[in-house]
Image (tube, helix red, strand yellow):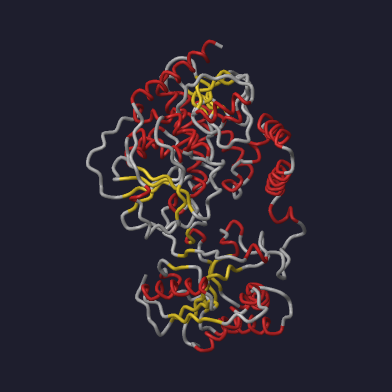
Amino acid sequence: MARIDPDKIVVCSFHTADDYYRAFGEKQRRSLEALGLPFEIAEIEKKDGEEWLDICRKKVPFIHSVCQKHPDKKVFWIDVDCELEFLPDFVLHSTADIIGFQRGFDDPFNIGYKKRARFWEPCFWGIHTTEAARRYIAAAAESEKKAEVRATDDYFFEEAWRLHAASMTFQIIPSQLVAGRKDNLATGVRPFFYFGSSGNVDKFKGQAAQHRRAGIGRFSLMGAGDFVRRTSLAAAKAVQDGLPDQLSLKMRRLSDNSGLTGLLVGDGKTTRAMNPELLRSYWALVAAARAGDKAETERLLALVDGKQLPGDQHVTFEAAARALLDYATSGDGPPLRLAWWDRPFPGNFGDWLSPLIIGGISGRRVVHEAPTKLSGEPHLFGIGSIGRFISRKSVVVGTGISQRDVALHPKANYISVRGPITAQKLREEGGEVEDRFGDPGILISRLIPVTRDKTNGKIALVRHHTHRKLAARLPENMDELSVMVGSRAGITDLVEALNRYDSVVTSAMHIYIACQSYGIPVALVNFQGGESAVHGDGIKYVDYALGAGVPERTPIVIDPDMRSTDFAPLTYEARISSAKMDDVEEAVREGIRRLDAI
């Protein structure tokens, strides 16, 4: 951040006179003082009968009053429960009349009113000293003063925007600069804005006046495919939630076996900006790589290379295809068909341990079977909480479940399961399995032996892939590593990196398992605001521990702002025994023999 001239800028905000919001106000003051930013943070009165909507709309005249008080200063508003890590030069020195985030913190692929009823996200924005900027904020204040509608501040900002936008310059802050709105780790972008969500939006959603979105109907706003997918997911959940347990399980199994589950949980967000022709080429590329067709994979890689610049989507598809091809073509003998969850691309560490370990132990090629669309050929099930997808043609080695209310196919060929909870569920379904337990992920230290020498004095953070977009804030002695690796080289690099740290903090179960395979001190956590992001009811952690012979642990919920968290009481060291590894390895080998015999 460049040197700040206090005569040219002021940051403003307000809070009500209650302990909850007053604490946010004090935190905001300390933060702005540390950054050297001049500010005006007011405590406002909440009158009898006033609701959250009434407080929000006070933002409009408040900002206008600050602009009137400081006619020669840029005025930046920030919601009191939000925070700045720093203020980038391009924001500080913007020449636009208005600078801020697009509604919903959207990216340029969904600019303006394509999907939103309003243009701006006014939790943080800057108003210049220009005549156009001050005319705009005055119009918003006048609209708020006159209007009798029940609305929040952004309604009036939108009214003024529609009136004056044609005569104003404006600048959109990139969405990747909002912590938690994008996978900042994957892009190497340092966010500066931390969005707060302190409380009342959901409560009053639907009660405030709304603007109409552009377009002639819902299909024109989001596209038919996206609409059908969202509607189908919502409908499926609503139906299942309203059914008795047994009927719900039958519908879930029908969805799983028909491939509908795989369709509904696809990578819509990953591919939404890709033209249909290119998207078809990418999926053809993945299909060729899954089948081990090297010539076709290379042909399609060359084809898509010539169609698109190497952006994020290209990189993830190409990395997944190359990893799938490597597993499907490296090794001797006939290929092993293995079911594992290969999405999201480029691959999630825990899921992709399955082909690495099965291929490493067998020395054979491993061909991908989609759990949600099994081919009908005999196949293995290994690592993962994917027990609900097991079919009659499955040979099962160490697979588990993530929640109790799932059905396990009783007629599959079970060699072992993750732990006794999965085994008990199978017996309830009428299936049989020996008391032979253990997640094959514990074998990672045998497949990739790493000598754990002197460590670097720091902590490594590895978040579950569903937690990647939480607005985490790290202490100085912590580095973040990405869980999104699927190739042999990527998995090897990650476990070697983990062994260089004093300890690891993770919300990803198989990172936790890998640490116990190597004997790395580890803390298993979840995050406030993301407690339900990881699928399941929590039984998989206990199931794993009971099956692996280690102490039972479940995730401890922590604040994503980890700067003041003491991780020492949360961290402990446990190592998988050699005897357990021997037993799990032999179970894997037996599963392969059983598959070959079918």
What residue is rendered at 53% in x and 27% in y? 368
Query: Which residue reaches farthest left?
Result: 454
Q: Quadrant of residue 214?
A: bottom right
The residue lying at 51 percent from left, 25 percent from top is 417
Determine which quarter of the picture holds residue 140. Answer: bottom right
Residue 524 on image: x %, y %: 42, 44
Residue 136 visible to an observer of this rendering: yes
Instruction: Name the one closer to the observer, 361 or 396.
Output: 396
Question: Position of 143 compared to 536: left or right?
Answer: right
Farthest-out residue, right:
216
Q: Nearer the viewer, residue 139 or 206?
A: 206
Residue 592 in the image: state x and y as whole percent.
48, 17
> x, y percentage for residue 563?
37, 59
Q: Relative to 114, is 34 on the left or the right?
A: left
Q: Quadrant of the C terminus?
A: top right
Q: Quadrant of the N terminus?
A: bottom left
**41 over 351 or under it: above or below:** below
Residue 315 at x, y percent in the picture: 48, 43
Residue 166 seen by the camera: no
